């Protein structure tokens, strides 16, 4: 699968996905850091990438209908530390 890692997650998330055989890029690799959600979503649509983010705005299906994108994975946890983000991604990796 193809993924894009949003700026609110550790860039190492891309390495975890790549090591598992996926095609993963970060928003930083395309100079999209700080870009509005709409622009990042548009790029993901054009590239056929699932956006992995911690941004709850992207979970609003009225604003971002699922049928109009390859998908979103919203990682939310009480502890948003880098270590917890990476641990959660490793935990859900088999579901991807």
Image (tube, rainbow, N blue to C red):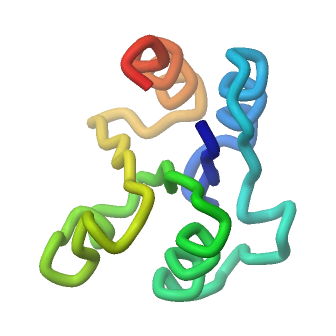
Residue at image point 83% right, 75% down? 31
Give the vertical position of 52 relative to 34 (above or below). above
Residue at 59%, 36% in the rendered image: 1
Q: Nearer the viewer, residue 11 or 16?
A: 16
**Is 13 left, or right, of 74 in this rendering?**
right
Asked if 17 appears above or below 57 in the picture, the reply is above
Q: Quadrant of residue 10?
A: top right
Task: Please give left or right for residue 36 compared with residue 92 in the image.
Answer: right
Frontmost residue, 46 versus 15: 46
44 left or right of 28 in image: left
Quarter of the C terminus within the rendering: top left
Give the answer, above or below, for where 79 lies relative to 59: above
Residue 54, percent from left and from top? 41, 53
Would you place residue 32 above or below residue 76 in this image?
below
Residue 65 location (% of width, % of height): 23, 73
Residue at 61% x, 46% y is: 3
How far from the left and from the top, in percent, is residue 49?
A: 58, 56
Q: Residue 92 in the image: x percent, y percent?
A: 40, 19
At 54% from the left edge and 71% from the top edge, which residue is drawn?
45
Question: Based on the displayed image, in which of its 4 quarters is residue 17 positioned?
Answer: top right
Q: Residue 24: which quarter of the image?
A: top right
Query: Could you tell me how many numbered marks the image carries?
Result: 0
Tell me: 3 left or right of 25. left
């Amino acid at each position: 699968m193809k993924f894009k890692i949003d700026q609110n997650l550790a860039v190492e998330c891309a390495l975890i996905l790549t090591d598992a055989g996926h095609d993963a890029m970060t928003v930083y690799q395309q100079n999209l850091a700080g870009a509005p959600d709409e622009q990042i979503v548009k790029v993901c649509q054009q590239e056929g990438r699932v956006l992995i983010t911690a941004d709850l705005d992207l979970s609003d299906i009225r604003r971002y209908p699922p049928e109009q994108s390859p998908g979103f994975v919203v990682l939310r946890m009480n502890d948003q530390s880098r270590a917890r983000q990476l641990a959660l991604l490793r935990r859900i990796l088999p579901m991807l």
